[in-house]
């Protein structure tokens, strides 16, 4: 990640009140309050619209997707049976870049996306270079053998990213030393390590 992109991500993290990268997390630990001379002051209450908008932005930022992609996923989630908010998170979590991150093959969602785009990832033995590819239960994700010897993936295989990532969720079976993971079943909202009030997101898009 370039320095300018890193700074941009930290600024976004500050505005959303959510650490999106390890660097942003370190910033929050150092300065657990808002920026500027009024950062320690009591913040004004936000409108209902602002609260719903921020929750939508928080969810979108954690997956690093564009607004158009988010709305498409929401419309699909709304057509499915069950609760729309839970359906939405489950659909987003099955993105290939999200599962590459959960497996520990990357340190951030941007790094996981770059890994996919640069054609380092196999799904059931075939190269997939679309971060939005939706993995099906039973499919196997693996860093391709010719890439496994590269330094970033050697670091990942050693478990060096696990100190900044949540525990591997139960819907993933990960063999980190082989840089391989299997989506065992469809993720459930309660298991997905994202910070978001999904009902607020549903209300935002349903207004």
Image (spheres, helix red, strand yellow):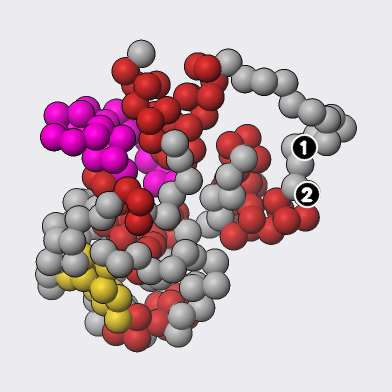
Quadrant of res 118: bottom left
Q: Residue at x 21, y 70 (%)?
A: 182
Determine the secondary structure under disc 1: loop
> Which residue shows up at 30% across the image and 81% down it?
175
Say if mark 1 contacts mark 2, CB within 8 Å. Answer: yes
Q: Does the segment drawn in magenta span residue 77?
A: yes
Tell whether 114 sits left or right of 125. right
Residue 114 visible, this orientation: no
Q: Position of residue 59 (x, y in %)?
A: 43, 39
Label at residue 135 = none
Q: Which residues are magenta?
A: 62-89
Say whether residue 14 is left or right of residue 57.
right
Q: Position of residue 119 (x, y in %)?
A: 27, 64
The residue that mark 2 highlights is: 31
**Residue at 24% across, 40% down:** 87
Residue labelled with disc 1:
35
Instruction: Determine crowd level at label 1: few under 14, some 14-19, many 20+ residues with C-alpha closer than 10 A.
Output: few
Element on which disc 2 rests: loop
Circle 2 crowding by C-alpha within 10 Å: few under 14, some 14–19, many from 20: few
> Would residue 172 be seen by someone viewing this image from the given angle?
yes
Residue in the foreground of this view, choosing between 5 and 25: 25
* Closer to the camera in the image, 120 or 38: 38
Image coordinates for residue 177, horizontal then vertical, percent: 34, 86
Residue 58 location (% of width, % of height): 49, 38
Labels in figure, total: 2
């Amino acid at each position: 990640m370039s320095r300018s992109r890193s700074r941009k991500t930290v600024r976004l993290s500050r505005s959303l009140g959510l650490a999106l990268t390890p660097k942003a997390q370190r910033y929050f630990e150092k300065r657990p309050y808002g920026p500027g001379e009024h950062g320690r002051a009591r913040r004004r209450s936000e409108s209902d619209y602002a609260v719903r908008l921020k929750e939508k932005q928080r969810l979108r930022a954690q997956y690093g997707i564009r607004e158009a992609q988010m709305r498409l996923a929401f419309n699909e989630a709304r057509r499915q049976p069950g609760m729309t908010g839970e359906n939405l998170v489950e659909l987003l979590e099955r993105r290939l870049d999200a599962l590459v991150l959960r497996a520990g093959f990357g340190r951030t969602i941007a790094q996981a996306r770059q890994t996919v785009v640069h054609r380092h990832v196999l799904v059931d033995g075939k190269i997939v270079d679309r971060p939005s590819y939706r993995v099906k239960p039973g499919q196997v994700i693996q860093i391709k053998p010719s890439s496994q010897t590269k330094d970033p993936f050697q670091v990942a295989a050693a478990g060096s990213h696990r100190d900044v990532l949540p525990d591997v969720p139960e819907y993933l079976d990960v063999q980190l030393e082989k840089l391989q993971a299997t989506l065992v079943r469809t993720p459930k909202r309660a298991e997905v390590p994202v910070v978001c009030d999904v009902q607020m997101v549903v209300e935002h898009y349903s207004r």
